[in-house]
Amino acid sequence: MVANAVGLLLSILLIFPKVGLIFGEWTYGRWLPLHLNWQLYGWTALPLVAWVFFLLPQSRNSLAKASCLGIRAWSAVLALGGISWLTGHTSGKIFLDWTGFLRVLFPAVILYLWGVLALAWYRGEKRNWFVVPGLLVLLAVPFGLYFASSPEVYPHVDQSTGGPTGASLLNSTLSVVFLLLILPLALRHKPPGKSLDRLVWGFFAVNFFLGLYSETLPHSHHHPGQITCLASLLLWLGLLPYYYSKQEWKTPHPLWQKAMFVWLGVLILNGFITFLPGILDRLKFSNALVAHSHLAMAGFTTSLLIFVLQQILPQKIALRMNNRRAFWSWHLATAGYIVLMIFAGIFESTDPSFLTYPGVLRDTLYGLRSLSGLALFLVSIHWWKALQS
Amino acid sequence: MIRFFQRNGSGIVLIVATYFYFLIFAQFAFVELLNADLTDALKPMMAAMAFSGIVGSLTTPLILKHQGAPRTLALALIGCASMSALSVPAHTFISYLCIAMGTGLSLGLLTVTLTANLRSLLHPNSWGPSIGMGTGLAYFCANLPPVFATTSANQALIASVFVLVGLPAVRKLGNDESPGITAPPSKLNYFPYAVLVFLALVWLDSAAFFIIQHTKELKENSWGDSYLWRNGVIHFIFALFAGILLQKRSASILTIGAFTLLSIASLCLNQPELAITGGWLYPAGVSLYSTALVACPVYLTRSKNPAWAAAILYSVAGWFGSANGIGMAENLSHIPLLFLIIAGIIFSLPLIKPHKTKIAIALGLIIVTTFFSARPPALSARSSIDRGRQVYLSEGCIHCHSRYVRPASIDVELWGPVLSLAEIKKESPVIIGNRRSGPDLLNIGNRRSRAWLKQHFIDPQSLSAKSPMPSYRHLFQEGDSRGEDLIDFISLRGMQSFSERYEFTQAWKPKPMTPTHNGGQLFTKHCASCHGSEGRGNGPLHDLWIRPPANLADGPFIHSREPDTLARIIKFGIMGTDMPGHETLSDDEVTSLAQYLKNLRSKKG
């Protein structure tokens, strides 16, 4: 909700930059990391909160208390991060903006939560040893975050666009696919059947090796190998929904699951089309990529998170997120936002003065974007109040 | 509607009379009369009025007990009318002191008696809109140009008449008492919290009021003749809206809304460019909370004794709050952010659940401590280039500007020579950027001069109307080297690629075409700020540059003697001088503008 409010403020500042004068040194550039990082590390931490909700009714033991403490520490670090970014402390690495003492503190909180998770596994009645590899992979997260936040580390760049390479797009999407594949296992669902399991994991393995192979290819998005490897992701558009349809979910026709797959489909298609030669060359640095980010966060990630929440939380609480009006308001506002920004991106790419000398068209698009942002903010207030009650 | 007025008319008249008197006499006419007669007497007089107001408010419950509401109210109205009438012939310190104290006492008596007895004047189903209408009408009448703009003596006499008009309505008081109603549930039910909330609001309002009243430009932009009708209408609409909201049990939302509007208005008042926006928000915020303040003792809190509730509320929030607000504004001349943060914390208190108090306090302490100890990162680097890079990162320039020219693309024409990826990745951290809300900055040093960049950082819209770029004037304050360091950093690469860019621009020619754009409009938009509306080199920014802008109408034409070079200069500027390029203009626009300039010369020639 707070991150959405900051987003709304940012959209207003782009139309009325002088409004920013009331914040003094806290200019647009200082607010933006709050929006990006709070969305990424705050909003996407929702399942973490759900986990505590899940643990608390089951036991009032030290584990539940330790989890609560972890979440509070997480929130406190995000609040401190907000102050840090507002006061100009930044690493310059978008989405990895942990600098100074926070570069240690935030991974330390993650490490602490990993410890709680490991303890929960250790204390479990039936200790499942197959979980250990997963735990070890998770242990790499805090160290990976610390390493990736270093100003000295920078990923491969496509020389012709200044943007990401096909290999990095493929591998980051595959990590999302991996999370979607292990989600049913994490929720302790019975496997839908060995043949389907073999199919999806087999294809994942192939895709994984394609990802590794594409890293060895030239980084240009004009290279046919990069395009072909990335195109392999399109198969997941059918495979993942099918895999999920064979699982036994808490609710028979999960509303948010459908939304999640619609957005995932649009996300993968949008990502692939945008990557193609002649398109990325024009759209890189433009609002079309802002559209892609919102597609990923407000569309896909939000749907995924709420779907996960509903699987973890008790039914009574979970269904509070199913208010139809709020559901449709969120998705329509997100869709509107994305369409507006894609148009803005196309206009930018055809007319460079579209942003440098803003006219009625830009003002209209940005004004409508603010309205979409307002709708998203209001829905987030609704969810907050719904969960609080 | 008739029924509404039959039921609530007396109450509305009394609210209008009381509020109008307070606004036009106690806040305005008395101060002006005093200032006209005596110098340096304002502070003691206002202190005397505030002190008497507190005494008047706190003694009212006792007077009410012995004299009854109608008699007390009549006494208060007559007292108020007498004080404002007597202020006209007053000229000495003693006479003003007596009037100040008399006004404080009478007004204290009047406000507490009226608000504590509103139940007998207003119908239970329409008390909210009635209070809103009364408050809104009072503000509306006070803002009527013939009232607001007349002499202070006339204002004092008008105030006397207004309170006397309220006298007949006193008969209704206590006679037709409606059944008591319980305050609708809200955070304000808890009386101490309500006092804190209104204290913050009155404090804020009084500080903003004082700043507007004592800053000539703000006063003209807020209460100037052309704004009086606007203010009156905003006050009336928002007060009525507030009344409707109150009746619908939305007191908490109302006070939070009022605080938000007043806070934004206050922050706007601190910035000359935003004063007009503040002028719109301030009356809206004031009306919202003023309506709630009238309703508070009887309708919002669940106090058993409304008279004592009103007495404490108006003593603490009203008199004490306004005195402190004025004092704060007088001493600081602005509303500090810290005050708004503390007030914001007061408003947030009810959001904290009792069992989370300790956590909230701990978190609050951590955040406040960090907030006040956190400063922009120390610019420890030795060279101005490295310090500038740090500023570039701190200010988040990467969120709107790239530093990457895509090879073999339109970027080369627009933003300059390519820098290899290997060279770019040598920089730590790599700052390619992610978005282009503004131009690419890799080669900005050969496209724009230092003077141009500085002016653009300080006031971007002065050079590029409607630019979304925020002002970075704070980087150029005395003793702060951040602005100059930033310019050093962003200019560096452009200096290195100067000759490469120069060769490119010299080889450039627009596509041959018949111009279709209106050159005059383009000139006004892009050139007039420096070259003047008639091209004579006398635009509003003409004296900022090392060499004055060229007189495009009469010459001499040093750089553009050849007709072909004119388009090139429009497109890419004159490298090494303050004349910037207009790289994003299309060939058609450049040609149209060049044609306009040629015509401008030939007319004079």
Image (cartoon, coloured by chain):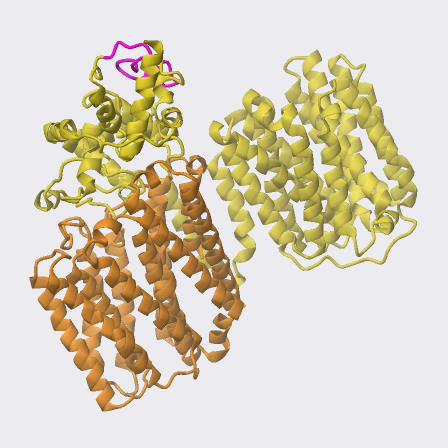
Chain colours: A orange, B yellow
Q: Residue at x 37, y 74 (%)?
A: A308
Residue B74 visible here: yes
- Image quadrant occupied by the C terminus of chain B: top left
Residue B567 appears in which quarter of the rendering? Answer: top left
Q: Residue at x 21, y 64 (%)?
A: A172
* Left or right of A387, for residue B233: right
Residue B335 visible here: no
Q: Position of residue A5 (x, y in %)?
A: 45, 52
Magenta-span inclusion, residue B555:
yes
Note whether A215 is above or below A284 in the view shown.
below
Q: Residue at x 30, y 31 (%)?
A: B514
Note whether A358 is above or below B1 in the view shown.
above
* Left or right of B267, for residue B118: right
* Range drawn in magenta: B538-557
Magenta-span inclusion, residue A179:
no
Relative depth, front residue between B550 and B225: B550
Dominant secondary structure of the residues highlighted in magenta in the image? loop
* Left or right of A190, for residue B424: left
Q: Position of residue B402 (x, y in %)?
A: 23, 42
* Left or right of A183, for residue B385: left
Residue furthest front as drawn: B514
Note whether A49 is above or below B362 in the view shown.
below
- Count of marks placed on residues: 0
Q: Position of residue A291 (x, y in %)?
A: 34, 55
Note whether B327 is above or below A81 in the view shown.
above
Relative depth, front residue between A37 and B292: A37
Relative depth, front residue between B307 and B405: B405
Q: Residue at x 53, y 61 (%)?
A: B353
Q: Position of residue B565 (x, y in %)?
A: 20, 22
